[in-house]
Amino acid sequence: MNIKRRQTIKAGSSLALVAAAISAGVLPTSAFADWNKAAFEAKNMADVLKALGGASAEKSADIVITAPDIAENGAVVPVAVASKIAGTQSISILVEKNPSSLAAEFDILPGTEPNVGTRVKMGQSSNVHAVVKAGGKYYVATKEIKVTLGGCGG
Amino acid sequence: MADPMRIRAQQKGDVTEVRVLMAHIMETGQRKDSAGNIVPAHHIQTVTATWNGKPVLSANFGPAVSQNPVMNFTFKGGAKGEKVIVTWTDNKGDTRTDEAVIS
Amino acid sequence: MKKIFVAAILASLAFPLTAQDVQKQIDRYRELLADGNPAELLEMRGEDLWKQKRGPKNASMEACDLGLGAGKVAGVNAVLPRYFADVDRVMDLESRIVHCEVTLQGFTMAELTKRPHSLNQSERQTDHEALTAYVVGQSRGAKVNLPQSHPKERESFLRGEKMFFFKGGPYDFACATCHGVDGQRIRLQDLPNFQKADNAQRAFTTWPAYRVSQGAMRTMQWRLLDCFRQQRLPEMEFLSPASIDLITYMGVKGKDGTMDAPAIKR
């Protein structure tokens, strides 16, 4: 990705500006979702947080993870996260024991409900963390999911 | 070329619920083929959605998102007949855009 | 057998849970999975293929008679296999789709039956799987009611029944060994007992299915092929009379079930 463009986007402090740029045809739509390589290659939560620009995450009861306690197949584990923390900016789903922890990150835009869901692969039973960024700070909730059949590799 | 997405957008009170199914292999880059060679990673990296030209979701996926990804989200607003447009882009530069009418 | 499996699962999970808890949580997992079924992607591809002009005769499949009249797709999977006068034999859905591809579109039987199923998760699903997904999806909600009034339909059922109980292979297995009694499992999967109507209904109405472990939708013909492999019986030939008769048997046993396929399974 073009570095200049990234800087331009970061310089635009409000998302509205980016949105305006997109609707004006200045930026391709993919521009508002930079893929953070360092975060997706990080091996643990601390490194993911660092790559996302945070230091530590505070435990929060205002993050609700909806996922099964036992997954019959680790290849497909439904995980949904809802945040009740005011000013939620992003929601990330991390699988602690996967080769790389971060599975998915959702930017919560103005007007988007802080409630997202997807399905992730789990190589083995593991803690799954939901990390929420709100007001520039990071919060986390954790749920252990048992896997009866690992879902990575061949 | 990539197969189309299945997008459902449903108005529920003052919000719109969107459910997206994407056809993608989501290869992890950890798997070996029968000859013992690593199968290179091939996965969706970014997913974005707009409603009336306004961004309503932006997501980044790593290879740990399941094959044929499912993504559910909700945004405020939306009326029956309006369009939701979803675009994904993968690490090989392939991209796919589809739309759904809010019901 | 059930006890041993559950005990093994509990031991492997190494945390205190009763068998009932495990079952409840597995059910919860399946419920969450059912909320989004990638088979729908294949149904869309299949619908496109169905309406496309293809083959040497450059024709679409829209004139195909699947048993409820030419061009009628809705509900057909709930009344198949059935007798077709034009070929004077009983056909299952997949046989009939292939038949139409040959007669309407001019494809050859050999090319259509060479590789009907995709091999593994990194291979694109075949056109046959896509067409099957589309047609099956158009029967959601239909009540299973296979016709049994034609003598050949009755004969098909009786042969299927005989095969179901026929023991063979190095393990001396019959379909009935696992699917004719209560409480059998493979890993965490409860196996349906076809002697019970509710079991047979659930089984018949939820195939074809998207297999999350394979990242692919599998057809009923594939299901039987793999059952035969697991029984170590000779390979079940695609669209063979044996496969059709077994599907007839299962469908008759599953009468009054409500079609809900393609389903999604582990």
Image (cartoon, helix red, strand yellow):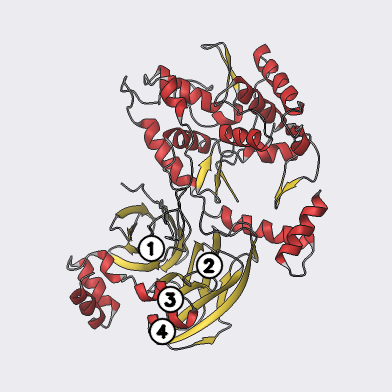
**Which structural element holds mark 2?**
strand
> Which of the 4 quarters of the picture holds residue B46?
bottom left
Q: Which residue is mark 1?
A: B78
**Residue depicted at 69% across the width and 26% down the height:** C249
Number of residues whose C-alpha sits closer than 10 Å to that of mark 1, classed few (under 14), some (14–19) or many (20 or more): many
Q: Chain of mark 1?
A: B
Amino acid type of the residue that numbered disc 1 sits on in the rendered structure:
Gly
* Residue C24 in the figure: left or right of residue C261: right
Report the Cα–Cα distance between label 4 and label 2.
Answer: 23 Å
Q: Do tags 1 and 2 sit on the same chain? A: no
- What amino acid type is highlighted by mark number 4? Lys
Q: Tell me which numbered mark, 4 or 2, is placed earlier along the sequence.
A: 4
Which of label 1 and label 3 is nearer to you?
A: 3
Mark 2 = which residue?
Answer: A80
Q: Which residue is mark 4?
A: A50
Q: Earlier in the sequence, mark 3 or mark 4?
A: 3
* Neighbourhood count class around disc 2 (C-alpha, 10 Å): few under 14, some 14–19, many 20 upward: some
How far across and how far down the image is residue C163, in percent? 72, 24
The residue type indicated by label 2 comes to: Ala
The image's mark for residue C206 is none
Q: Which residue is mark 3?
A: A42
Q: Amino acid at mark 3?
A: Ala
Which mark's residue is nearer the viewer, 2 or 3?
3
What's the CA distance linking mark 1 and mark 3?
37 Å
3D distance between C-alphas at marks 2 and 3:
22 Å
Give the quadrant of residue B20: bottom left
Whether the residues at callouts 3 and 4 have beta carbons within 8 Å, the answer is yes
Between disc 1 and disc 2, the foreground one is 2
Q: Earlier in the sequence, mark 2 or mark 3?
A: 3
In the drawing, does residue C60 fall left or right of residue B70?
Answer: left
